[in-house]
Structures are given as structure tokens and as C-alpha cells.
Image: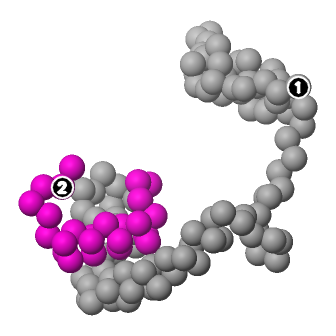
Amino acid sequence: MQINTVDIKRKLLRYIDNFPTLKGIAYSLLGKAHPIFLDYLPQGRPRYEYGIQPHALLNERINKYRSVFQSHLEAFLQYYDNFVQIPKIAKPKSTLPRWENGWLSSLDAIALYSFLCINRPRYYF
């Protein structure tokens, strides 16, 4: 009888999902993860969100340049026809542009493309 080690590992990893500390140790030993062990339970709640008082310094700076941000966003609209040609997803291992790409959010990609088109820098690093 031949023992399938891959199947044993898979079953073991599935079993230890019920034990977070043990799972962290096992994944670390297998080189699959680098857990951080805490002495306390994290409280997952935002400090700043809609309906709660905004972060004072960030709010001040955003408001100071709000009209600049608005004019940039409006300038991006001139490239709308180019943006709608980009598919949301692409075939696996595709090098073509796509909105869901794992590197840039859609707004960041729009801003990067637009600023390059508007400013036409000699070099882009």
C-alpha cells in the first residue's frame, strides 16, 4: 500500500483549521505563513468612518485641496473612451490591461494613465 503524503498534509491542514494557534505553528513550520502571535484579541473597529468625527488633520488637508482634486478628476473624464475599452478581467496569464489586476485600484490606474497623458513626462519610472 502506497501512502500519499500530499493527501495526508491536506487532511492535516484541514483539521488544524479548528485550532488557530496550532494552525499558525504548522503553517510556519511548512513555510506557508509567518504568523504573528498576540497576547490579546484584536478589536476590529475603525477609528474613523462615515458618521463618526473625521480625522481632523486629514479632513483639513483634504478640504484645503478639494477644488484641486475635483479639477483633476474632471480632467480624467477626457480619457473616458479609452477607459471603457479596458476589460474588467482578463484571461489567466494575460499581459493585457484590466481593471481587476492586483496591483492598482481602478482610481489609481485612471489617475496614473491620465497624469501621464496630460503631463507627457520625458521619463516615467
User: Residue 23: where, in percent of width, then height?
Assistant: 76, 25
Q: Compared with residue 27, is residue 109 higher up or lower down, i.e. above or below?
A: below
Residues rendered magenta in the picture: 102-125
Q: Is residue 96 visible?
A: yes
Q: Secondary structure at mark 2?
A: loop
Left or right relative to 13: residue 103: left
Label 1 belongs to which residue?
39
Residue type for callout 1: Asp
Query: For this view, does 88 lie left or right of residue 36?
Result: left
Q: Nearer the viewer, residue 123 or 7?
A: 123
**Image quadrant of residue 107?**
bottom left
N-term-proximal mark, 2 vs 1:
1
Q: Which residue is mark 2?
A: 124
List x then y, in percent, for residue 122.
9, 60
Asked if residue 11 is among those painted magenta in the image, a careful observer would answer no
Q: Quadrant of residue 84?
A: bottom left
Question: Residue at point 61% right, 26% down?
Answer: 33
Residue 54 position within the rendered picture, expressed as x and y whole percent measured from the top left = 75, 69
